[in-house]
Image (cartoon, rainbow, N blue to C red):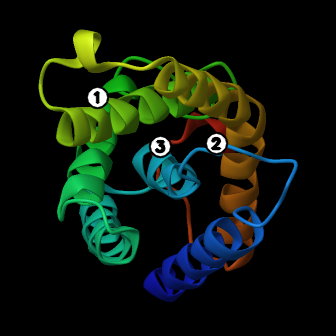
């Protein structure tokens, strides 16, 4: 049931991102919204579940994107590792942590994709358009990322699947 939930959410995000947002004249340079799902899995789900989701979603996105293969998968795995490391020190349900993790995800993904596309010498090959794109993605991510993560968490809770036992935000019930 959990993996069906992830499949449906991933499919909705991919369709929304590739069909609706691309054709919108008002929204440019939106971050990879799949990062929301990866951050959610990193914060609130077990490691084994996170690794499976990251691998399947990463390979799916690598196949669709046209970028070098394993670029998305590598980014998502590193983000999962960073988020799992962060929650050892911080509360997974903290509202302060959510924008921070989205920011890390956006910067990590852009760093990997810029290194792949422009080579390892990033500072000399960075263009103003790249900086503008990254800045726009950071703004969009910090505004929409945390509510989207909370929305995914609420939808997952409605399926009846228990949240991760270490999630301190659920002890209020």
In the displayed structure, does residue 79 sit left or right of residue 157?
left
Quarter of the figure with residue 162:
bottom right
Q: CA distance from mark 2 to mark 3?
A: 26 Å
Q: Secondary structure at mark 2?
A: loop
Quarter of the figure with residue 94:
top right
The answer to whether residue 19 is above or below residue 80 is below
The answer to whether residue 7 is above or below residue 167 is below
| First of labels 2, 3 by sequence position | 2
Residue 143 is tagged as none
Give the percent coordinates (x, y) of residue 21: 74, 62
Residue 29 is tagged as 2
How many marks overall? 3
Give the percent coordinates (x, y) of residue 106: 48, 34
Q: CA distance from mark 1 to mark 3?
A: 10 Å
In the displayed structure, does residue 130 sit left or right of residue 84?
right
**Residue drawn at (20%, 60%) of the image:** 68
| First of labels 1, 3 by sequence position | 3
Q: Secondary structure at mark 1?
A: helix
Q: CA distance from mark 1 to mark 2?
A: 29 Å
**Residue drawn at (25%, 59%) of the image:** 73
Quarter of the figure with residue 87:
top left
Residue 43 is tagged as 3
Q: Which residue is labeled 1 in the image? A: 85
Residue 6 seen in render: yes
| Tags 1 and 2 touching, CB below 8 Å | no
Residue 100 vs residue 18, the one in the foreground: 18
Residue 34 vs residue 46, the one in the foreground: 34
């Amino acid at each position: 049931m959990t993996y069906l939930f992830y499949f449906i959410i991933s499919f909705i995000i991919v369709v929304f991102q590739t069909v609706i947002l691309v054709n919108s004249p008002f929204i440019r340079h939106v971050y990879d919204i799949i990062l929301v799902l990866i951050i959610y899995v990193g914060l609130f789900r077990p490691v084994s579940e996170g690794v499976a989701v990251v691998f399947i979603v990463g390979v799916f996105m690598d196949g669709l994107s046209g970028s070098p293969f394993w670029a998305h998968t590598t980014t998502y795995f590193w983000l999962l590792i960073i988020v799992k490391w962060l929650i050892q020190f911080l509360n997974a349900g903290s509202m302060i942590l959510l924008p921070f993790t989205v920011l890390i995800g956006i910067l990590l993904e852009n760093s990997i994709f810029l290194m792949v596309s422009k080579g390892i010498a990033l500072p000399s090959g960075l263009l103003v358009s790249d900086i503008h794109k990254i800045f726009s993605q950071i703004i969009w991510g910090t505004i929409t990322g945390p509510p989207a993560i909370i929305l995914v968490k609420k939808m997952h809770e409605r399926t009846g699947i228990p949240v991760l036992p270490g999630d301190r935000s659920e002890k209020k019930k």
